[in-house]
C-alpha cells in the first residue's frame, strides 16, 4: 500500500481547448486517477514524478498554472479507498474489451477481421496492464478470455482423468480477490461436492501460498480451458453428474463468458448482486459465504 502520492493541480485558460484535450489524453494514458475538477493522482514513484513534471511544464507553456504536490494522505480518504478507486478505473478499462472478445468467443473459427480484433484487444490489454498499479482482479478475467479466443484448439472434453474427491479433503483453495460469479459458484461447488471442509484464501500470486490449490487464475489446472469456465472445468475434472449442477454450469458459463452459448439468463441478477457486494466494504470471504447461500438456493430450486 503506497504511503505517498503525487497530486497534480492544474488550470488552463478557457480558450485552450486543444491543450485541455491533449492533457486529458496524456493523463488517461498514464493511468492517473482524476481527482476533483482539475487534479490528478498517481502513486509516488520516480517514473510518475517525471511524467507529472513534464505535464506540468506543458500546462505552463499553454498559459496555464500547475502545481505538483507530494502528499502522504488526503483528508477523508484512506490509502485503501484510493487503491479501490484506481482498481475500479482499471476494471472499467478491462471490461470495455469484453464485448468484442465474448462475441468472437462464441464462434467456432474467427475470421481474418476477428483475428485482427483479437490482436487489437491484446495490445489494449497490455496497455491497460502497464497502468494497473495495484493488480486489479478483473485483469485475469479478460486475460483468460483472451487466451480462450486466441487458442481455438482447446478441447474441454479431454481435461484428464476424473479426480477423486477424497484426495482433496480439508484443503485450502486460493482465488483472486473480489470474486464474481464464476469464482463464487466454483467455491460453492467445491464445498458442496468436492471438499466440504475447504478453506479459501485470496491472492493474485499462487506462489505466496504454495500449500493452497489455485482456481480461476491464468495458467492453473482449475481454471478456464477451451470453451469451459472454471465452474465447468471443476464439474468435468471431478465428474459431477448432478443434473441441477449441470444447469448451474450453463448459467455460470453464459454470465461469465458472455457468449450466450446456452441461452441461460437466470444468472444475470445474481451476478449484479455479487458485483454490488464487491463494491461495498464486504470482505472476500463474506462474498463467498453470502454467494454460496445464493447458489445453494438456486441448486435446491433446480434439483
Image (cartoon, rainbow, N blue to C red):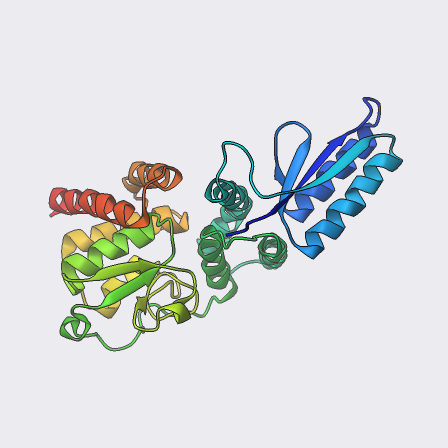
Residue beneath the point at 56% across and 53% down? 133
Residue 86 location (% of width, % of height): 54, 44
Q: Is residue 1 left or right of residue 207?
A: right
Q: Is residue 79 left or right of residue 178?
A: right
Q: Is residue 241 above or below residue 211?
A: above
Query: Does residue 176 appear anywhere in the picture?
Result: yes
Q: How many marks?
A: 0
**Residue under the point 29% across and 76% down:** 160
- The residue shown at (77%, 32%) is 20
- Residue 109 locus on image (x, y percent): 50, 61
Question: On screen, 160 above or below 114?
Answer: below
Residue 179 drawn at (x, y percent): 35, 50
In the rendered view, does 5 fall on the left or right side of 8?
left
78 or 157, which is in the foreground?
A: 78
Observer-nearest of 285 and 19: 285
Is residue 233 in view? no
Q: Is residue 42 above or below residue 194?
A: above
Query: Residue placed at 38% from the left, 66% from the top?
Result: 225
Q: Residue furthest bottom?
A: 161
Q: Nearer the viewer, residue 45 or 244?
A: 45
Residue 67: x and y in percent read 75, 36
Amino acid at each position: 500500500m503506497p504511503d505517498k502520492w503525487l497530486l497534480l493541480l492544474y488550470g488552463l485558460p478557457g480558450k485552450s481547448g486543444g491543450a485541455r484535450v491533449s492533457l486529458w489524453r496524456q493523463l488517461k494514458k498514464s493511468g492517473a486517477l482524476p481527482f476533483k475538477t482539475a487534479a490528478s493522482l498517481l502513486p509516488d514513484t520516480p517514473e510518475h514524478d517525471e511524467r507529472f513534471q513534464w505535464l506540468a511544464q506543458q500546462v505552463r507553456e499553454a498559459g496555464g498554472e500547475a502545481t505538483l504536490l507530494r502528499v502522504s494522505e488526503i483528508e477523508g480518504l484512506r490509502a485503501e479507498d484510493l487503491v479501490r478507486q484506481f482498481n475500479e478505473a482499471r476494471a472499467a478499462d478491462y471490461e470495455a474489451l469484453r464485448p468484442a472478445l465474448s462475441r468472437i468467443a462464441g464462434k467456432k473459427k474467427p475470421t481474418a477481421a476477428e483475428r485482427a480484433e483479437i490482436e487489437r484487444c491484446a495490445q489494449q490489454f497490455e496497455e491497460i496492464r502497464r497502468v494497473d498499479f495495484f493488480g486489479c482482479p478483473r485483469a485475469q478475467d479478460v486475460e483468460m478470455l483472451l487466451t480462450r479466443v486466441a487458442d481455438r484448439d482447446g478441447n474441454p472434453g479431454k481435461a484428464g482423468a476424473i479426480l477423486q474427491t477424497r484426495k482433496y479433503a480439508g484443503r485450502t483453495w486460493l482465488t483472486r480477490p473480489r470474486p464474481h460469479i464464476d469464482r463464487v459458484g466454483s467455491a460453492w461447488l467445491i464445498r458442496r461436492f468436492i471438499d466440504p471442509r475447504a478453506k479459501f484464501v485470496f491472492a493474485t500470486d499462487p506462489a505466496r501460498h504454495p500449500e493452497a490449490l489455485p482456481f480461476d487464475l491464468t495458467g492453473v489446472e482449475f481454471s478456464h480451458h477451451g470453451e469451459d469456465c472454471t465452474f465447468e472445468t471443476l464439474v468435468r475434472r471431478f465428474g459431477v453428474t448432478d443434473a441441477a449442477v449441470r444447469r448451474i454450469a450453463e448459467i455460470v458459463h453464459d454470465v461469465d463468458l458472455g457468449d450466450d452459448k446456452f441461452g441461460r439468463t437466470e444468472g444475470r441478477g445474481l451476478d449484479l448482486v455479487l458485483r454490488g457486494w464487491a463494491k461495498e466494504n464486504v470482505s472476500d470471504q463474506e462474498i463467498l459465504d453470502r454467494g454460496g447461500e445464493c447458489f445453494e438456493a438456486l441448486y435446491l430450486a433446480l434439483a
